[in-house]
């Protein structure tokens, strides 16, 4: 009896502490010290994983459509350039056009230089005259003006005839703003190859001169027709003087010019033909006096 009692008591003492572990009091808690808090904070700041990262805004890339120079709505500049050289200043005033021409389309044709006012036409501003063929309204120095234009008799026939055998150039001392409008109406068939205006003239002793040497043509094959002797003072041997036209509807000067040019084919140097024509004209004037 005593033996079994001792075994039971031994087992009871061995098992009991295992059941009593769950009932044991939890370990007492004490607040961390200030040094420990500082050390923990410093270690967390130095840790790359816990360090706060700056905010970054993700930029959305805009895809540019293929085969397009730009998708911007801004208009492209009024000039294009393919080099690194900066474009010209477009605000500067346009430069006068040069008086030198490119070689003519038909180099074998002689060149006839025709004056405009009082040679091919006569024009006057307001009030309207009794006779005129058309009106042009150029803007000169910011002011619009009306010019009533009367064509000289046979001017249309002269231009048509000369275009078949000669290169036609109109050289006027008039302003381009005015003269270009007149020529647009006069030259309906576009037979005039070149136009020269006042800025192409030379000023000699205060007078406007048309220097034929600047045309880039062989002067042996150049003739100028003008009512103003100052215009051809540098090359008088190339000039055919013509009476000024104002309003005479029976004027026949241009018809006589056609007859002259029709018979000038036999002259290699047009200046010889001009010399003969001028001499004949002077002889006729003497006989008529």
Image (cartoon, rainbow, N blue to C red):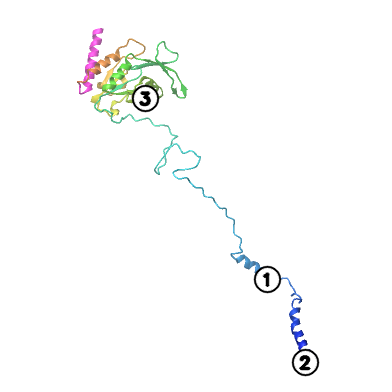
Report the residue at 75% width, 81% height from top.
17
- Label ID, residue 89: none
Region in magenta: 267-289
Report the residue at 62% width, 68% height from top.
43
Q: CA distance from mark 3 to mark 1?
A: 100 Å
Q: Position of residue 97 (x, y in %)?
A: 36, 30
Marks 3 and 2 close (CB-CB < 8 Å):
no
- The mark lying in front, picked from 3 and 2, is 2
Of callouts 3 and 1, the N-terminal one: 1
User: How many numbered markers are drawn?
Assistant: 3
Q: Position of residue 165 (x, y in %)?
A: 26, 22
- In this rendering, the answer to whether 91 lies above or below 189 is below
Residue 201 visible? The answer is no
Of callouts 1 and 2, the N-terminal one: 2
Circle 3 residues within 10 Å: few <14, some 14–19, many ≥20: some
Residue assigned mark 3: 198
Q: CA distance from mark 3 to mark 2?
A: 150 Å
- Of 199 and 177, nearer the camera is 177
């Amino acid at each position: 009896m005593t033996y079994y009692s001792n075994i039971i008591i031994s087992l009871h003492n061995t098992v009991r502490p295992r059941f009593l572990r769950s009932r044991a009091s939890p370990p007492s808690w004490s607040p961390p010290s200030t040094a420990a808090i500082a050390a923990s904070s410093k270690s967390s700041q130095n840790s790359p994983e816990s360090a706060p990262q700056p905010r970054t805004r993700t930029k959305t890339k805009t895809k540019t459509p293929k085969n397009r120079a730009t998708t911007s709505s801004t208009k492209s500049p009024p000039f294009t350039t393919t080099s690194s050289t900066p474009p010209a200043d477009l605000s500067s005033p346009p430069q006068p056009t040069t008086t030198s021409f490119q070689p003519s389309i038909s180099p074998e044709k002689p060149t006839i230089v025709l004056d405009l006012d009082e040679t091919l036409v006569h024009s006057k501003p307001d009030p309207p005259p009794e006779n005129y063929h058309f009106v042009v309204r150029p803007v000169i120095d910011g002011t619009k003006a009306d010019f009533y234009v009367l064509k000289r008799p046979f001017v249309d026939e002269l231009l048509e005839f000369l275009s078949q055998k000669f290169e036609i150039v109109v050289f006027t001392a008039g302003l381009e703003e005015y003269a270009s409008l007149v020529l647009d109406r006069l030259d309906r068939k576009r037979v005039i190859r070149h136009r020269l205006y006042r800025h192409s003239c030379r000023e000699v002793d205060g007078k406007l001169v048309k220097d034929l040497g600047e045309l880039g043509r062989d002067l042996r094959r150049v003739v100028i027709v003008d009512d103003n002797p100052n215009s051809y003072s540098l090359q008088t041997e190339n000039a055919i003087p013509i009476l000024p036209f104002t309003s005479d509807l029976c004027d026949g000067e241009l018809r006589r010019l056609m007859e002259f040019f029709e018979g000038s084919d036999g002259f290699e140097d047009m200046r010889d033909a001009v010399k003969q024509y001028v001499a004949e004209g002077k002889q006729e004037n003497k006989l008529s006096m």
